[in-house]
Image (tube, rainbow, N blue to C red):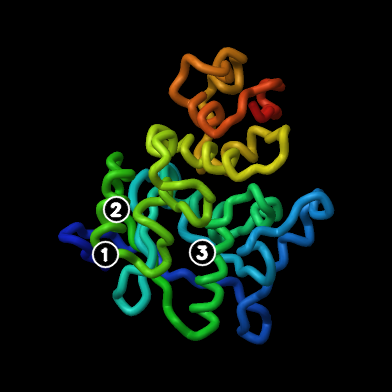
Amino acid sequence: MLLFKSNGIYFEYVTKIIPELDQDGNIKKYFPQKRYAKRNEKELHKYGEGQFCKFKIPNDYKDKEGVYILTIDNEAMYVGECVDLSKRFNYGYGNISPRNCYKGGQQTNCRINKIIYLETSNNKSVYLFFKETDDRNNLERKLIKKINPNWNKSHGKILETKENKFDSKDEEVTEVKGKYKNLFNYLLNTKNKKITLTYDEIESIINSKLPDSAYNYRAWWANGGHVHSDAWLKSGWKVQNVNLGKDVTFKRI
């Protein structure tokens, strides 16, 4: 088994990242932004324009929680955390959603996809390594601070000040923990006064499936009284309406 050692911690080899190729052996170019139904209503963010690639990793890592490292020439280039490694890559980095190309979408997915596209186009080999752990947030921050990987924009994604347009000194940012911090970041960057997200869209944003109670009980979506409600309340939103199992409408406070 191949291993990658970083800061005294061993990471298991997952796969080599290989984008889809065309008949001539060139990387296929994808333009998902053209398929977005609301493309005339929103602006592309700074990573949303141009071509993307597609790639997959093994589904053996479904529901595997932990920290992953992308490497080139045995050097750590990017460190991240996830609650489902297969989903993070197969439905995040490796398959860019049209809406994520526009402002309010997940910029990091587009940014990392573009980097992988450029590096592999230049005949660089990108490898993925993984460490399964439930202490993923702390380990991610420690590694980023220690090795300062080139592709990471900051010391941990919840402090990505330039990309998410908030000050890293803001106390509210650090108080939103766990998988729902991604929903916090998403809503924080949304410019509209009201937004409706399907359950599938919310699960894509948090990189995890919502609990059964979110599907069956409106009380789960109450504005307060639960840790997960911090994701919208602390980003300046409240839940206005819920169609159980279908979609949720958020309104800016």
Which quarter of the rendering shows the N terminus?
A: bottom left
Name the element at disc 1.
Answer: helix
Q: Amino acid at mark 3?
A: Ile
**Contact, mark 1 vs mark 3 (Cβ under 8 Å):** no
Q: Note whether 89 is above or below 62 in the view shown.
A: below
Q: CA distance from mark 2 to mark 1?
A: 16 Å
* Camera-nearest residue between 207 and 142: 142
Question: For the residue marked with disc 2, what is the amino acid?
Answer: Lys
- Residue at image coords 51%, 43%: 207
> For mark 2, what is the residue?
131
Residue at (22% x, 63% y) in the render: 6
In the image, 221: left or right of 242?
A: left
Residue 112's tag is: 3
Please tell me which residue lies in front, 181 or 199: 181
Give me the residue at 57% from left, 38% from top. Answer: 203
Callout in the foreground (3, 2): 3
Residue matched to label 1? 147
Answer with left or right where residue 69 lies relative to residue 217.
left
Q: Residue at x 38, y 64 (%)?
A: 78
Q: Please, what is the three-letter code of the amino acid marked with disc 1?
A: Ile
For label 2, the SS is strand
Mark 3 or mark 2: name the one nearer the start of the chain. 3
Q: Is residue 194 visible?
A: yes
How packed mark 2 is, by other alpha carbons closer than 10 Å (few <14, some 14-19, many 20 or more), is many
Nearer-the-camera pick, 66 or 3? 66
Name the spot of residue 147 as percent of width and height, x first: 26, 64
Q: Is residue 72 above or below residue 215?
A: below
Residue 175 in picture, x, y percent from top left: 39, 33
Bin the neighbour count of mark 3 within 10 Å (Cα to Cα): few under 14, some 14-19, many 20 and up. Answer: some
Q: Disc 1 to disc 3, how far (Cα)?
A: 18 Å
